Image (tube, grey):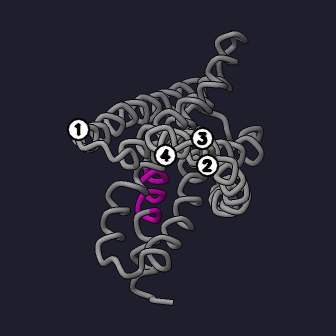
Amino acid sequence: MDTRRFIIAITPAIIIISAIYLSDRHDREPLKLLMLTYIFGALAVIPILIVEEFLLSINIFSGTLDALYTAFIVAGFTEEFFKRLVVLKIPYKTKYFNEKLDGIVYGVFSAMGFATVENIVYVVYRYANNPHVGLYRGIFSVPAHAIFGVTMGYYLSLAKFDTVERRSNKNFWRSLYMPILLHGTFNFILMANIPQLSLLFIPYVIYIWWINQKKLSKFIYDSKNRVIDIDREE
């Protein structure tokens, strides 16, 4: 294995999880639970590969419809379903998931677990002859998975802490289909082979980064105020 390429492959995810961990400065999550979420996010590659191979085997489409199917169903649905499942099964019902920012933190850790393994596969093995693949994926693909994780965690938190059942249920399902839509659109722009559409890629990446940065900032602000309120009560 090429050590240099391996380091290039894992660095983007390490930077992102470090940044999200440091952002949660008012009520940090246990490292053990974070690493468990990250590890199972990485292990989610196994069922994801199995399901994706099956979905590809029954693909009857071609051209643009093939790109839509692969982008939204094969990749978007499968990957976001299992990354979300990791959060639901591990941290979601623990006592440590006690504020809205936690959804984003755990969502990103799960997403980065998957993205780390995927990036190793692409950078170290599948496209090892391409000297630029590590740079491209480090700038676009891995951060995109983090963005999808922010979206998923944002809506999971809204669902968990909302006392209105109907609204909670609505956000619970949003935590699945919103990341799928963002992920599918990201992939479809790249896969459709439509020159006019490819011009929208950079603006789209900037847009989804911007809207999810606002989500993150909102919950960081809420976390700070929550700690202040607790201190005042004491």
Q: Earlier in the sequence, mark 1 or mark 2?
A: 2
In the rendered view, tell whether residue 218 sits above or below residue 142: above
Relative to 199, is 121 on the left or the right?
right
Q: Secondary structure at mark 4?
A: loop
Instruction: Residue 99 in the image: state x and y as whole percent.
Output: 60, 33
Please state which of the two labelled residues, at mark 1 or mark 2, is closer to the viewer: 1
Find the distance from the CA under tag 1 to the CA under tag 2.
27 Å
Q: CA distance from mark 3 to mark 1?
A: 23 Å
Whether residue 100 sits left or right of residue 208 in the image: it is right
Q: Earlier in the sequence, mark 4 or mark 1?
A: 4
The amino acid pointed to by label 1 is Gln
The spot of residue 23 in percent (x, y) is: 43, 47
Q: Nearer the viewer, mark 4 or mark 3?
A: 3
Name the residue that disc number 1 marks: 196
**Residue at numbered disc 3:** 73
Q: Nearer the viewer, residue 192 or 17?
A: 192
Sooner in the amino-acid sequence: mark 4 or mark 3: 4
- What is the span of residues highlighted in magenta in the rendered image? 13-22
Residue that mark 2 sits on: 79
Disc 4 to disc 2: CB gap under 8 Å = no
Q: Which mark is residue 24?
A: 4
Q: Amino acid at mark 2?
A: Glu
Based on the picture, tell me whether residue 16 belongs to the magenta stretch.
yes
Q: How many marks?
A: 4
Asked if the stretch drawn in magenta spans residue 203, the answer is no
Query: Can residue 32 be spotted in the picture?
Result: no
- Which of the two labelled residues, at mark 2 and mark 3, occupies the earlier sequence position? 3
User: Are dots 4 and 3 in contact, CB under 8 Å?
Assistant: no
Q: Residues within 10 Å of mark 1 (few under 14, many from 20)?
A: few
